[in-house]
Amino acid sequence: MNISSNCSTYRCIKNGFGYEKYLNEISPQCRTMFVKFRWRNDNLPVVKDRFLNIVYHNRTCKLCKSDKIGDEFHYLFQCHELRDERSNSFSHII
């Protein structure tokens, strides 16, 4: 887990193994989406392109066509094509 690029998002969210009690506080639908996100069970380039044998540094964002890796961090915090969605979704937090 500590050296695999597949676990980079997981390492940012968790620092150990074990059940997280906050998962009991969210709806089953949100819990499913959150767990899939943590496990990288998605169609982001960083995951999907792995199965096409594309080297890691070429698994870039298809939305903004930047040279940034198309991973969870990029889509949640950096991609300028998702700026409005980010603003609408996180406005109550920021």
Image (tube, helix red, strand yellow):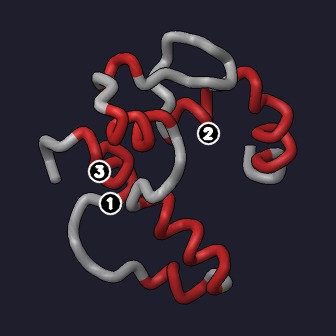
On the image, which quarter does residue 51 sit in?
Answer: top left
Contact flag, marks 3 and 1 (Cβ < 8 Å)? yes
User: How far from the left and from the top, in percent, is residue 9?
Assistant: 38, 47
Q: Which mark is residue 14?
A: 1
Q: Is residue 14 above or below residue 4?
A: below
Q: Is residue 9 left or right of residue 36?
A: left
Q: Is residue 7 left or right of residue 63?
A: left
Residue, disc 3: 11
User: How far from the left and from the top, in percent, is residue 79?
Assistant: 65, 25
Label 1 Cα crowd, 10 Å radius (few <14 / some 14-19 / many 20+): few
Residue, disc 2: 76
For badge 3, the amino acid type reads: Arg
Contact flag, marks 3 and 2 (Cβ < 8 Å)? no
- Of labels 3 and 2, earlier in sequence is 3
Tag 3, which secondary structure? helix
Label 2 Cα crowd, 10 Å radius (few <14 / some 14-19 / many 20+): few
For badge 1, the amino acid type reads: Lys
Tag 1, which secondary structure? loop
Label 3 Cα crowd, 10 Å radius (few <14 / some 14-19 / many 20+): some
Q: Is residue 49 left or right of residue 87?
A: left
Most extreme residue toward the front is 52
48, 4: nearer the viewer: 48
